[in-house]
Image: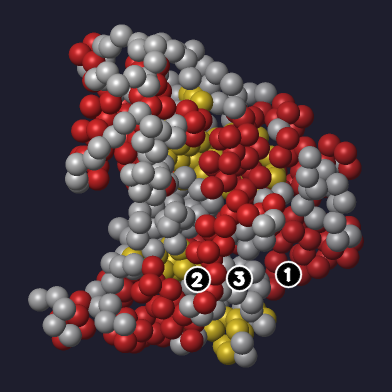
Amino acid sequence: MTILAKHASYKLAYDALRAHGVDPFNVRFDSVLSPTEGILNGRRMILLGTNNYLGLTFDPDCIAKAVEATSRQGTGTTGSRIANGSYDGHLRLEQRLAEFYGRKHAMVFSTGYQANLGVLSTLVGRGDHLMLDADSHASIYDGSRLGGAEVIRFRHNSPDDLYKRLRRLAGSPGERLIVVEGIYSMLGDTAPLKEIAAVKRETGAYLLVDEAHSLGVLGAKGRGAAEAAAVEEDVDFIVGTFSKSLGSVGGFCVSDTADFDIMRVVCRPYMFTASLPPGVIASTLEALHKLETEPRLRASLMRNAKRLHDGLGALGFTTGPQANPIVAVVMPDQEVAVTFWNMLLESGLYLNLALPPATPSNAPLLRTSVSAAHTTKQIDAALEIFAHVGSELQCLPSDRRRAGGVV
Amino acid sequence: MRETHQLALVASNNGPERNPVREEIAAVFEQVLGHAVQITDQTDIVEDLGLDSLGVMNFVMAIEDFYDISIPLDRIAQVQTVGDLIQAVEQLRSGVPA
């Protein structure tokens, strides 16, 4: 018995999972070769689960900017911006983000996780009300606990349930902040932002949209789900990350709210962690430039997403409702999911195994994320591998028919 | 909706007396689980009824709909037994701040 004995039930489940094959939560790549390929146990793999939406991690210009900034300004800032000061890159990136979103203010955080921790815990506190979609990311749940606001959960993507809960609060003091995500990270479904914005207007709440998975993905300019739904004016705060479409690491918040800069001296997850190193800032700036000036990246991404989503559907797999860059395949149970995932890996296809309670329902998911950098050939190869493994495991409707399982 | 469910606050939830809230909660449990359940105030919602975290969430949302209340997350975290839940429901319906 150790101090970690309290996690015994997780250990039991984790050990059982690992006994099944490769540890899905600790995959060790020998090397990563490109946004879409890596080597695992000596074998070349297609990467179809790394959120690398625009495929910019190996972009020569982004790399050159990172190298140049690192040579000129060093590998790290060795502290927070309140202690060690801001570098010109931090300020430039904040200015560029504000311009990109057409907002007055922007603030950069060291990770997307910290952006949610910081913003949620600073905007609302004791006596305020935080309205969270039930399928919110862990960083939103964790941020909600840090600030002391009363946290109320509404049914996933249900503006009616949100409205009902805000109505129940009528008459009680305190601010209301609604938090939703542009694209939800597990099933790839988008929030009904038009309807949610209407609820926001009617109830006088504030609205925050986390565009982590939708920046560079949705909207004519790539600003995300709020742009795509034409409700940017109703969104008071946008939070996002650099670690997906922008191919680096870090998080941000943009807003028009007056007094925004007070956050810099009251927001603890901003104040008490080291700021992003110059190389990361420089590659992020360049990636943002690419996102703005190369809309063909978004077009390739959506073309690949549709090809994979439609292809999996045609094979008979159950996927999420929309052809977004996150395509999740619903598995009947954990046993099949783990076996399926291991067989995909053996066949040269890497993606994410998502198990409850990290999934929105009790069903495990094989979660894929598509990149603009995938070739049509790679998407088709992935579909072929899916078809082969699905058929081996008799997971496809046609196979079950053949096997006499389902009529 | 609220008026039709008005109930006096009960000082103690541990007595053997019939408690309409407990009966209503049992009915919601049956609806969510799809089978009849025997519950007392001491029934542990996770241990005794075998609900996982998603089951608990669905059950809590059904309870919230039934009483037209929202149970804040920190209050849900304090609820372990049916008795705790009855107390939370009664307090929220009588307007006692969370």
Residue drawn where x is 50% and y is 64% of the image: A13
Q: Are marks 1 and 3 on the same chain?
A: yes
From this viewpoint, which residue is outermost toward the front? B16
Q: Pick whichever of labels 3 and 2 is earlier in the sequence.
A: 2
Where the C terminus of chain A falls, by quadrant? bottom left
Labels 3 and 2 in the same subunit: yes
Residue A26: which numbered mark, if any? 3
Judge the density around disc 2: few (<14), some (14-19), many (≥20) Cα neighbours within 10 Å.
few
**Distance between the alpha carbons at the discs numbered 3 and 2:** 14 Å
Which corner quadrant of the image does residue A203 belong to?
Answer: top left
Q: Amino acid at mark 1?
A: Ile
Residue A355 x %, y %: 44, 62
- Residue of label 2: A16
Which of the 4 quarters of the picture holds residue A392? bottom left
* Image location of residue A218, percent across then percent down: 45, 54
Q: Determine whether A352 is above or below A167 in the image.
A: below
